[in-house]
Image (spheres, helix red, strand yellow):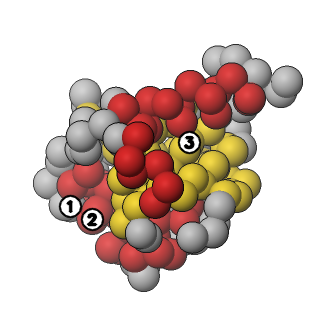
Amino acid sequence: MQERGAFVTLKKQGELRGCIGNLTPQRPLYLTVQNVAISAAINDPRFSPVTKEELKDISIEISVLSPIEPIADVSEIEVGRNGLIIVKGQNQGVFLPQVATEQNWDRDELLRQICLKAGLPEDAWKEGAQFYVFTAEVFGEEQ
């Protein structure tokens, strides 16, 4: 019943198949997970909707988010522990904590990649960007 932000990541044979979430709490956690799971399956613009035939090959990972906190300096980012949000102008990008670990990124590569994800030049983090961090309790199915 606690209100928390959450993401649901869908993978098919280990490859990303959809990922959608809410950063900020808007309703009880079980409803958030339910809504973002459906959205990850049918509304992630990077993928076509998951089909009924694919369901047997899809694994689900749920990330329950801590409250989001601003940071003053990128040196505060703990790669693999912190999820990261960048905001610069109208652009925003988000990575869950496990993404950097899965991709074997160090802090510099994480900063480059989040800029690109936000539609910014890869060095845009160096000036005028705001950063926020969070942690996540991650659990799901093994496949």
* Spatial separation of the CA atoms under disc 3 and disc 1: 27 Å
The residue that appears at 24% across and 40% down in the rendered structure is 48
Is 37 left, or right, of 28 in this rendering? left
The residue that appears at 69% across and 45% down in the rendered structure is 64
Q: Is residue 87 above or below residue 102?
A: above
Q: Three-letter amino acid code at disc 3? A: Phe
Q: Residue 1: x, y in percent?
A: 85, 24
Q: Residue 95: x, y in percent?
A: 44, 53
Q: Which residue is mark 1?
A: 123
Q: Three-letter amino acid code at disc 2? A: Arg
Give yes or no for contact between labels 2 and 3 (Cβ–Cβ under 8 Å). no
Q: Residues within 10 Å of mark 3 (few under 14, many from 20)?
A: many
The residue that appears at 43% across and 70% down in the rendered structure is 14
* Spatial separation of the CA atoms under disc 1 and disc 2: 6 Å
Residue 90 quadrant: top left
Q: Residue 70: x, y in percent?
A: 57, 42
Q: Which residue is mark 2?
A: 112
Chain-order first, disc 2 or disc 3: 3
